[in-house]
Image (cartoon, grey):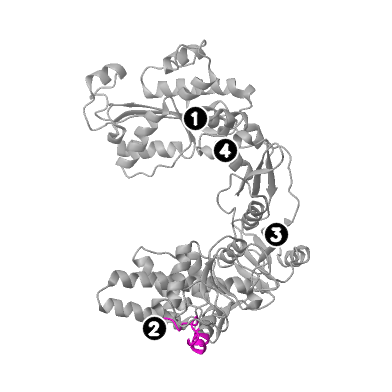
Amino acid sequence: MHRVIDATPLQLSIADAGTSLAEAVFVVVDLETTGGAPSEAGITEIGAVKVQGGEVIGEFTTLVNPGVPIPPFIASLTGITNATVASAPRLGTALPAFLEFAGDAILVAHNAPYDIGFLKGACALHDQPWRGNRVLDTARLARVILHRDEVRNCKLATLSAYFRTTVSPTHRAFDDARATADILHRLIERVGNLGVYSVEDLQALSGRVSTAQRTKRHLADGLPAKPGVYVFNDPEGKALYVGTSRNIRTRVRNYFTASEQRRRMSEMIGIAVSVTPIVCATALEARIRELRLINEQQPRYNRASRRADSKPWVKLTAEAAPRLSIVSTLADDMSDGAMYLGPFSSRSGAQSAIEAIMCAFPVRTCTPKLARAPRAESAGCIRYELGSCAAPCMKDGGHDDYARTIEQVRAVFSGDARAVVSAVEQRMRELSAETRFEDAATWRDYLATFSRISMRTHALRMLATNAEIIAARPTAERGWEIHCIRYGSLAGAITVEPGVDPRPSVEILSDAASVFAQPATPVPAGLIEEATELLSWLESEGTRLVRVSDPLSIPMNCGGDAAAHLLSVQKRMQRSSLHDADFAWMSRYSRPAGPVASASVSRIGHAS
């Protein structure tokens, strides 16, 4: 399958969605208990019927010795006495047998919270993992499906009489389970004319679903069960919300079920009139498309990524006496001498990096723009008196000294972070010697943030200056997903089926992929966030480089050693502010093997 990143969105043919009710396996279960709390798991009997397509395909029943006396009232109601269960298996034996019988089937019960609560309590009590089976409640279903003039209430006995079940409930688990199974089938027959054909539809019908969600379920009809992007549109065709999923159909259907509880999403669904699917070759392509669509269309219900490139950067300004400042976007002033580090996740992170740099270099902190030949007689700030600034603002200030300082700072921005690392580590040693450990930890965090972002900056530049990178990663099906990256933007994506030689597909992808102009400055051609996603994918497990225009390398001394060391420290302290994806870059590009460390290129072969 081949798809270029700029392909036109497709509206595919209508297909059945979700798990068909005819194919779904249900295990209808009923319990008899001693009463009390579910956590006590006082179960005296388990009865269950396994059904599929309206037919019984399995049965399970057992008495259970609860290990505690059965109250007289319960014994009178169920007929299960202490003598009845004296020789019955304990719950620790009966429970695993039932769980094996149920497997991954959909559990059905009348007043399900009660029975499922006891089963979960039993699992917790006996260290059995709860499998998280989907659950249907026939009592709740009946309240939704049946009219009030049909039945006076939705008790099991009432519904059994109304539907004339083959077995009447007797307060014994197996009989009650069989009666519940008949009720389930009758309820499913009733909802066929409502367009309910899947388990997901049935769950939506029985859940706490808003009127807007219930009436808009048809928007999911015909969506493809493939990875990609989905776009909810308003009556004017404008995007309301953009999302991505490995299965578009299943994800969109979830918006119309009880699992969707976000108020803003319910509001969005009330406005939406259509959903546009965009099928993608890979999950990475879907993520990139999502970022681009959100950035281009600014849908009102997408809170994250609406300002994908409005992240903080630390800027070394281009002026007579440069200074460090925090800006929200990259400006077109690199050719004038401005330099940038970033992006940071927050302004506080950017400020941490500035603190680390200023620990090594006395850069001015005042904000006025200074003339090349200042006339001021005094500095006007205390930093000059403390010896932490050369005062380029003064007529007789240390202009040459300040110029040399700025050249050293430029070296840091260019990839030589050794002076910053050395200065901060010295500060940490001094503070530790004075037993000021909390202050030393603060400087440790400053250095970790600076080192990590320094590496990220140069990794982004590496992508931005590379005309073409083609890389592949094995799929779960033992095929290949292959991506073409040009100047830091995704140009194309393709998947290769298992057993097929991927090499011809690489050539097809390279020929068909989008063409991007080389950026005038060393920044990615597209969104910075897109380039960051591409970096994470390139360093993910199993990814192999197939072809690169230029060797992938970043400056050897840009901070990788310090970042890797501090990451391990912070993980041990459970105070990590770094990410595992960043550690992958650290481990590859921190080898002491010369002025730069380069990633090797390995060819992909046949999928096996």
Give how far apart the Cα atoms at labels 2 and 1 are: 67 Å
| Mark closer to the chain start, 2 or 1 | 1
Q: Which residue is mark 4?
A: 255
Instruction: Please tell me whether residue 20 is drawn above or below residue 521 in the rendered image.
Output: above
Neighbour class for label 2 at 10 Å: few (<14), some, many (≥20)?
A: few
Q: Regarding mark 4 in the picture, which secondary structure is present there?
A: loop
* Rendered image: mark on residue 494: 3
| Mark closer to the chain start, 2 or 3 | 2
On the rendered image, what quadrant is the N terminus found in? bottom right
Instruction: State the image coordinates of residue 407 (x, y, percent, origin top left).
Output: 54, 85
Report whether 95 appears left or right of 342. Answer: left
Q: Is residue 125 magenta?
A: no
Q: Is residue 403 magenta?
A: yes
Q: Regarding mark 2 in the picture, which secondary structure is present there?
A: loop
Give how far apart the Cα atoms at labels 1 and 3 are: 41 Å
Report whether 123 appears left or right of 514. Answer: left
Q: Residue at x 28, y 71 (%)?
A: 437
Give how far apart the Cα atoms at labels 4 and 3 are: 29 Å
Which of discs 2 and 1 lies nearer the camera? The answer is 2
Instruction: Please tell me whether residue 497 is drawn above or below residue 603 in the rendered image.
Output: above
